[in-house]
């Protein structure tokens, strides 16, 4: 042992024999003695049973005295088991996952002087009130207090010394009354002036230089040093439909546990996975998105004995993916993905084939003009436009692909936080509108029209034979009958006659229907959507400082023989051999 480490006496935690401390040696001796007593004096039947019980008790006593688990004594471990395993509370985790951000208050081994002073002042006030109440009760019956029966009785004074004792008590009370206001004021002033410093000395706030690990006198090991720095980085976040794909990269070897939750009111995860990642190792997780407000938790425990977790929730997750419906097209953010240095995604548009278009149309013209606003079914011939995307200060326009997916890609700085993604589509559609025919009206007044012309008539020929009987009466009274026959024949001929006819036309309006070609129109529409997503810092490996050098263990060194001889001569000692 070095000269500056020579102890004046043996401490309780010093290992003196077979790596055992003095309390452990005493406990082992006591356990052995009790075991021998069980064997020698216990009335438990034959000696074999007593020997077995004695051996079991001795082994249990030695294990409880000298054994430890992780540097913690077995009785303390058993106490923890009784408290946290068999008791009403159970902690499902390892001790390394319990991170304290503030050191526990040290045990108070002594009383602060100011606190003692305040307690003394309080005791004086209580004593004064008690004596005052006793004076008020003089000459009256005392209340029923059984606890006063077992208190120490006052020493009775002799009759001749009673008056002297009363006078001395009165003088002492007068002196206390004169000093009491001064003492009370002094105590109150000291307490009001020094109470903040007292609180700070007992607890105090944690500063940046204070370590985040703690120790306790009841454990025989030092917890691992706190090494600041991130252990896990998000290297990619993609949301497509109802699935989130997240890429992570470990800056230090760790055990990673991933859980996906539905919403705040559902503590049961809908997805769980666990794996081990080496330093600079990567992993990809495809997790379902369920519920209106999903969240993802990545909890880790590294090989340095530290643990932690990061969570993606709320505005970190672009879900649900925004969509909007317009008159011409509906726009939907089909997918969005963040990778270190950029944001990319796809916008899907679906356009209609026909649309109702309002027209101010001339339906009738001429004698009467009729114009009216009509709604006509227009055919969408073509849709074109641009897609303006802005995220984290980056802005760019992309040509829009109608009825298909339009990809976009913008650079984004690597800085941990939440960025807003806004997408605006400027659409232009060419419409072909079938126009109904035009009705033209023409007014005609009343009109008399004389038409003269030659009329040709064809007279057909005809012939006829006529027979007739003629009777002649003679004067003599006789009659003579004669048969007469004649044939009439008219030949056919053409007869031309000059004729004039008069026609009267009444007043009327004449309509004419004229077909018109389809009308071409251009229609504009503006659609916009927005969402937010999380971005992370650039990956950086964890810098692990070298462990601190262990202090050199003290070792025993044999003193020179001359020094021992001098000590033995001074003490009149001699070697037994």
Image (cartoon, rainbow, N blue to C red):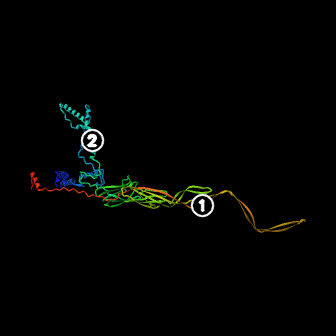
Looking at the image, how many numbered discs can be counted on the residues?
Answer: 2
Which residue is denoted by mark 1 in the rendering?
Answer: 514
Task: Indicate the position of residue 238 as horizontal and vertical percent values.
Answer: 39, 59
Front residue of 475 and 380: 380
Residue drawn at x 61%, y 58% as measured from the top left: 440
Front residue of 477 and 439: 439
Task: Indicate the position of residue 215 as horizontal and vertical percent values.
Answer: 25, 52
Q: Are marks 1 and 2 in contact (CB under 8 Å)?
A: no
Task: Indicate the position of residue 278 as horizontal and vertical percent values.
Answer: 31, 61
Relative to residue 495, is residue 217 drawn left or right? left
Which residue is denoted by mark 2 in the rendering?
Answer: 191
**Sequence-first disc among 1 and 2:** 2
Front residue of 107 and 398: 398
Residue 476 vs 415, above or below: the answer is below
Task: Indicate the position of residue 284 as horizontal and vertical percent values.
Answer: 36, 60
Outermost right residue? 476
Of helix, strand and loop, which one carries label 2?
helix
Residue 519 vs 181, above or below: the answer is below
**What is the CA distance from the residue labelled 1 to the residue labelled 2?**
107 Å
Q: Work out which quarter of the rendered image holds the N terminus and state it.
A: bottom left
Q: Can residue 40 be seen in this view?
A: no
Q: Work out which quarter of the rendered image holds the C terminus and state it.
A: bottom left
Relative to residue 313, is residue 129 drawn left or right? left
Front residue of 523 and 403: 523
Q: What is the crowding at mark 2: few (fewer than 14 residues within 10 Å), some, or many (at least 20)?
A: some
Q: What is the crowding at mark 1: few (fewer than 14 residues within 10 Å), some, or many (at least 20)?
A: few
């Amino acid at each position: 042992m070095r000269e500056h480490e020579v102890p004046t006496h043996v401490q309780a935690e010093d290992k003196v024999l077979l790596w055992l401390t003095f309390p452990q040696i005493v406990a082992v001796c006591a356990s052995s003695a009790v075991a021998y007593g069980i064997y020698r004096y216990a009335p438990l039947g034959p000696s074999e049973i007593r020997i077995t019980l004695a051996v079991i008790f001795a082994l249990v006593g030695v294990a409880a005295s000298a054994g430890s688990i992780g540097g913690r004594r077995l009785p303390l471990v058993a106490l923890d088991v009784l408290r946290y395993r068999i008791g009403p509370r159970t902690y499902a985790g390892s001790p390394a996952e319990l991170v304290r951000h503030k050191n526990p208050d040290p045990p108070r081994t002594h009383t602060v002087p100011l606190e003692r002073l305040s307690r003394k002042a309080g005791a004086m006030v209580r004593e004064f009130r008690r004596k005052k109440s006793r004076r008020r009760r003089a000459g009256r019956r005392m209340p029923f207090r059984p606890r006063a029966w077992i208190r120490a009785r006052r020493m009775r004074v002799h009759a001749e010394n009673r008056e002297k004792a009363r006078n001395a008590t009165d003088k002492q009370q007068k002196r206390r009354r004169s000093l009491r206001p001064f003492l009370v004021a002094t105590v109150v002033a000291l307490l009001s002036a020094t109470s903040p410093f007292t609180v700070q000395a007992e607890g105090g706030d944690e500063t940046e230089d204070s370590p985040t690990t703690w120790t306790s006198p009841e454990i025989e090991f030092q917890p691992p040093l706190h090494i600041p720095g991130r252990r896990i980085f998000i290297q990619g976040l993609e949301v497509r439909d109802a699935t989130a794909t997240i890429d992570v990269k470990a800056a230090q070897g760790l055990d990673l546990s991933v859980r996906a939750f539905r919403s705040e009111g559902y503590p049961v995860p809908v997805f769980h996975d666990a794996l081990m990642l080496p330093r600079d190792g990567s992993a990809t997780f495809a997790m379902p998105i369920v519920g209106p407000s999903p969240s993802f938790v990545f909890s880790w425990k590294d090989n340095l004995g530290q643990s932690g977790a990061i969570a993606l929730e709320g505005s970190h997750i672009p879900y649900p993916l925004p969509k909007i419906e317009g008159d011409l097209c509906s726009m939907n953010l089909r997918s969005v993905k963040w990778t270190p240095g950029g944001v990319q995604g796809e916008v899907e548009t679906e356009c209609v084939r026909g649309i109702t278009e309002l027209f101010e149309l001339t339906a009738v013209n001429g004698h009467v003009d009729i114009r009216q606003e009509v709604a006509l079914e227009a055919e969408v011939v073509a849709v074109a436009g641009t897609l303006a995307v802005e995220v984290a200060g980056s802005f760019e326009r992309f040509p829009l692909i109608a009825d298909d997916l339009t990809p976009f890609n913008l650079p984004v700085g690597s800085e941990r936080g939440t960025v807003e993604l806004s997408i605006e589509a400027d659409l232009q559609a060419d419409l072909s509108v079938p126009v109904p025919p035009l009705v033209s009206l023409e007014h005609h007044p009343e009109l008399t029209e004389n038409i003269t012309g030659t009329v040709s008539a064809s007279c057909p020929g005809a012939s006829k034979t006529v027979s007739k009987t003629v009777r002649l009466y003679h004067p003599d009274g006789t009659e003579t009958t004669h048969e007469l026959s004649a044939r009439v024949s008219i030949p056919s001929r053409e007869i031309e006659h000059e004729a004039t006819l008069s026609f009267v036309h009444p007043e009327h309006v004449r309509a004419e229907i004229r077909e018109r070609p389809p009308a071409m129109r251009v229609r504009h529409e503006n659609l916009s959507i927005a969402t937010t997503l999380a971005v992370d810092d650039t990956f950086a490996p964890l810098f692990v400082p070298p462990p601190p050098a262990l202090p050199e263990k003290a070792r025993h060194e044999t003193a020179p023989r001359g020094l021992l001889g001098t000590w033995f001569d001074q003490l009149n000692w001699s070697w037994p051999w």
